[in-house]
Image (cartoon, rainbow, N blue to C red):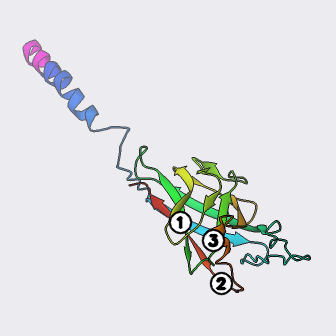
Amino acid sequence: MKFLSAILLLIFIALVPVFTTGQERQADHKVNIEIPEVALLGLVSDEASQVNFTVTAPNEAGSPVDFSNASQNNGVWINYTSIIRSQNHRRKVMAMVQGEIPAGVHLFVEASEATGVGKGMLGKPVGKVALSGQATEVISDIGSCFTGKGSSNGHLLSYELEADNSANDFVTLEHSQTTLHVVYTLTDYN
């Protein structure tokens, strides 16, 4: 009898861990997180979203046409949101003109440093650049970020119109009234 009791006690001790493992106090499940790649750009202005240049005629014969007032800071802001695909990936803002810039003049744009409520790796302005029918970089090195939305957020655009001072191009100046479209694109570095 003692022998049988000892065997039953050993069996009971051996089976206790089996019964207690069925009483786990933890459980788990998977959580999948997906962050999308994002590239959004918008232009915002408190005033009219167009920029107007009026070149001043000279008051005295023999004087040149006055381009000194041909710069505009019309309150046009670039806002963007960017989520990049990897930490080595960067974006840039390109600008180009749709339409024909009048002969004898050059149109320039310059983006300010980013201001406002934005966060992340905001882009860096490249300085004053001449606009043409070919896309040119205006803001570089954009990572994952957002500028904030609306005016006073993002990069303020300043435009300038200059006469081409070479004698060959000044001869091409003629009376005109031209409407152009400046197109901005948030794009990947190749």
Label 2: which secondary element:
loop
Helix, strand or loop at disc 1? strand
Viewer-closest of 177 and 122: 177
Please say whether residue 77 is visible from this viewpoint: yes
Kind of residue sitting beneath label 3: Asp
96 in magenta = no
Q: At 8% across and 18% down in the image, what residue appears?
A: 4
Q: In terms of depth relative to the viewer, which is nearer, 137 or 87?
A: 137
> Distance between the Cα atoms at labels 3 and 1?
39 Å
Q: Nearer the viewer, mark 1 or mark 2?
A: 2
Query: Mark 3 — residue?
Result: 169
Percent of width and height locating residue 166: 65, 64
Q: Earlier in the sequence, mark 3 or mark 1?
A: 1
Q: Main secondary structure of the magenta part?
A: helix
Q: Secondary structure at mark 3?
A: helix
Pick whichever of labels 1 and 2 is earlier in the sequence.
1
- Read off the magenta span: 1-7
Residue that label 2 marks? 179
- Judging by the rendered image, the residue that carries numbered circle 1 is 40
Q: Position of residue 95 (x, y in %)?
A: 56, 66
